[in-house]
Image: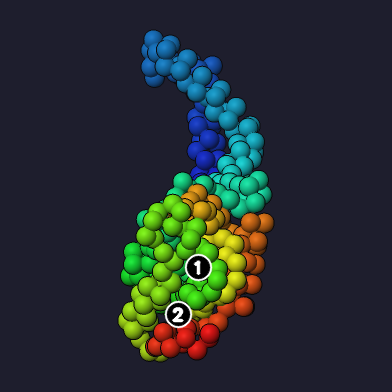
Amino acid sequence: MANGFRNRAERIALGAMATAGVGVLLADLLGWLDKMAPGGTLPKITLLILSTVTLFLLMEFDRLKVLDTMNAQVSRLDIDGIEGQLRRERYDGVTRVHPSFPEAAFIELLKNARWEVSILQTWIPNLEQLKTELTRAVTERRTEVRILLLHPSSLVADLRDRALRTGEPGRAVDVRGSLQILKSVHDEVPPQLRHRLQVRVYNSLPSIAVYKADDRYLVSSFLHGRLAIQSTQLEIDGCDTAMGREVQGELDKLWGIGREVDLRDWQRSIDTMN
């Protein structure tokens, strides 16, 4: 509506200027212009030029409308969306590579998570730093939080422990420490929302470490002598991308074979699984 009103106003203004220009020409031919403004040659020339330009614009009015329409169409283009789509198609969803776990960036993702947070790890060495936002995700936004940890008594846990000790003596796979922190999160969540915090342990070969917030993933590998959070992190955007589907498939598979931990008494819950 605004464009239609503007177009009508422009047409009326151009028509009035063209009419005035024609009137100036007639007045000049009849000698009236010299009587009204003797010696006004320069103003007459200026008026003639303006009249000519106005007539030209009036004749090109429809073409100018086409340009106006094109400008409106371009302004509606989602440039960021197109860029994101091209990136997903070109890199299978990988948007960035981090030299190590970007803790501050993931905390921001946690703050904005609306439907799901998932973590797949052997144990979570940076859980204390994430604890507050995990609690808020459940209590304030009703977000589903799913945590997958390696069973502390599994043979794989012992192997991973040895792999870490080759790089940093004294460092161990501390699944029980992670479970104790998760119990404190459980205790801070209102009873009616505790079902949204789910923890399972798996007894299988760990493939990748995954930190997920909604449809954004941070994925790394388990290298010898180094924590997964110290390894290179692939940031993946989109569950529907090639990499996103692969990572989500691994999450779902391990979640399916994992056994649920009762955080009210996680030690007893773990012991009864043996």
Estimate the spatial distance between the alpha carbons at disc 1 and disc 2, rounded to whole Å.
Answer: 27 Å
Q: Residue at x 58, y 30 (%)?
A: 57
Mark 1 element type? helix
**Quick check: 46 above or below 191?**
above
**Quick check: 238 above or below 53?**
below
The amino acid type, in three-letter code, at marker 1 is: Asp
Q: Residues within 10 Å of mark 2 (few under 14, many from 20)?
A: many
The reply to whether residue 274 is in sight is yes
**Residue 132, percent across and down?**
33, 70
Mark 2 element type? strand
**Residue 160, percent across and down?**
51, 63
Closer-to-camera residue (92/251): 251
What residue does disc 1 label? 158
**Residue 196, percent across and down?**
46, 81
What residue does disc 2 label? 197
Q: Residue at x 41, y 69 (%)?
A: 174
Marks 1 and 2, the one that precedes in the sequence: 1
Closer-to-camera residue (205/42): 205
The reply to whether residue 239 is in sight is no
